[in-house]
Image (cartoon, rainbow, N blue to C red):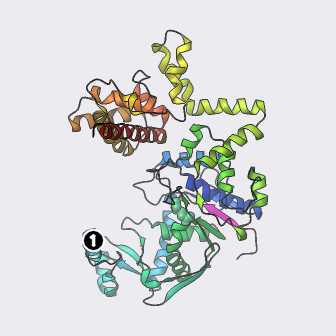
Amino acid sequence: MANSAPRVRIAPSPTGEPHVGTAYIALFNYLFAKKHGGTFVLRIEDTDATRSTAEYEQKVLDALKWCGLEWSEGPDIGGGYGPYRQSERKHIYRPYVDRIVQNGHGFHCFCTPQRLDEMRAEQRAAGKPPKYDGRCLSLTAEEVTSRVEAGEPHVIRLKIPAEGSCKFTDGVYGEVEIPWDAVDMQVLLKADGMPTYHMANVVDDHLMKITHVARGEEWLASVPKHILIYQYLDLEPPVFMHLSLMRNADKSKLSKRKNPTSIPYYASLGYLPEALMNFLGLFFIQIAEGEELLDMDELITQFDPENLSKAGAIFDIQKLDWLNGRWLREKLGEEEFLARVQDWAMQGDRLMSGLKLAQTRVQKFGELPDLTGFLLKSDLGLKAAHFDGLKKLDHAACLEIIREVAPALEALPDWTAEAIESALRELAESSGRKLRIMLPPLFVAMSGSARSLPLFDSMAILGRAMVRQRLKQADIALKAGIDAAQANNG
Ligand code: GLU
């Protein structure tokens, strides 16, 4: 371990809504840096050009700032080791890949995607884990040169020792041993010349002088590949720390299909960033009952990476609610409380946007809370009965529509009223339904009422994560109603 001040990083991939798991790992790194007088770096890992977007990158930055996790170096503020966005570092990686190949530790692979698919299908059929079978390892140097010169598409892969195992010490897991046999000949450079996550990650951690890599346990199995890359490049690996994943109460992996995971979703519900950080920070420290209410400075004081909490990181919403309530009551003065409520209502200008939409629909202001309240509510308390009396649609038909709309909206790259409208129009066309028929159950799912503000605008204001959650709640309510009716009839 380096004796100088540590340098740590959070390295999100901007491929989706900012995830509470990212805040959890970022908080660990932030506390680690603050505790040891080190530096907290933000690096954007956007080597996957098809899934990374500038919009998601901005959202990740905004979400981490909202959490209060300020970085000292990053794509927005620069620093001594930039650029901090991997897509702007493409030219940096190539010489490292070349060095690995020249030293005989990497090889050109010309296998086509089709051949790889067939290989994996055969492995699956034989009950074996999918892994590159090494066909291109045996190509002669002359053959490789002539195929490269002929312009044949290829990738560069990492050679893996034929036997033995990789042993390393993880700061959280302790001694780890993974047989080389279980490690894939990882692609380092893709056919388009972009490095893979593994290659870029190692080179950047080295060049950015990262001393400690703390990240989710899903990366533990990748450490042998990373250690090999460090060895092949004659570089010293950082200290690795793999943190247990956050889980749902049933111990399953936290995923947006089960529970909302997006940071803006929790912000829009009116959780304080301090309470969310307090909640996540408790996963890292051992604390006596009754002493859980901690601000960032207190978290830093209590934080001890040598003595992490042994309890699993369960995303227990009731505990978050409890902590948030305590923060509101015990930590905010009256003025601060009011200021925070105002910030919350105005998030993304949602209250103003909602009021503008309501202008043509009210006779007096007193009707506004009923008409616009759904934009701010945490829970609509939706029941199947809310869907009663929709023209021509029984509960089963409503449920069918909800279940068609949910995945269609998931696939939307842009979240705007126009994009939502055209997605729903397309869906109506392809399903042979009239859009006019599809909309009423969506009004109810979004607002709890069939009389409401314009739907597409409302969905745009509510945001992706809230719309996802409301569709899910509508699904649950309708399903329960249908099941109950069936039980009564049976
Ligand atoms: N880009 C990776 C992620 O988003 C970072 C993993 C790491 O920290 O090495 O999970």
Quarter of the image where one finds residue 24:
bottom right
Q: Position of residue 432 (x, y in %)?
A: 20, 34
Kindly give the residue lying farthest to the top in the view shown: 363
Q: Position of residue 209 (x, y in %)?
A: 65, 69
Quarter of the image where one finds residue 303:
bottom right
Residue at 30% from the left image edge and 70% from the top image edge? 153
- Some atom of ligand 1 lies within 8 Å of the CB belonging to the residue at label 1: no
What's the amino acid at mark 1?
Answer: Thr
- In which quadrant will I find the N terminus? bottom right
Q: Position of residue 226 (x, y in %)?
A: 52, 75
Residue 259 counted in the magenta span: no
Kindly give the residue lying farthest to the bottom in the view shown: 163
Asked if one can make out residue 1 in the rendered structure from this viewpoint, the answer is yes
- In this rendering, the answer to whether 368 lies above or below 200 is above
- In which quadrant will I find the C terminus? top left
Task: Write the start and end of the magenta stretch as one range.
Answer: 5-12
| Image side of residue 31 versus residue 424, left or right | right
Q: Nearer the viewer, residue 250 or 128?
A: 250
Asked if one can make out residue 79 in the rendered structure from this viewpoint, the answer is no
Indicate the secondary structure of the residue bearing disc 1.
loop
Q: Residues within 10 Å of mark 1 (few under 14, many from 20)?
A: few
Q: Position of residue 121 (x, y in %)?
A: 26, 72
- In this rendering, the answer to whether 16 lies above or below 426 is below
Residue 6 counted in the magenta span: yes
Name the residue tied to disc 1: 112
- In this rendering, the answer to whether 232 lies above or below 401 is below
Residue at 36% from the left image edge and 29% from the top image edge? 387
Q: Nearer the viewer, residue 97 or 307?
A: 307
- In this rendering, the answer to whether 457 lies above or below 364 is below
| Number of numbered callouts drawn | 1
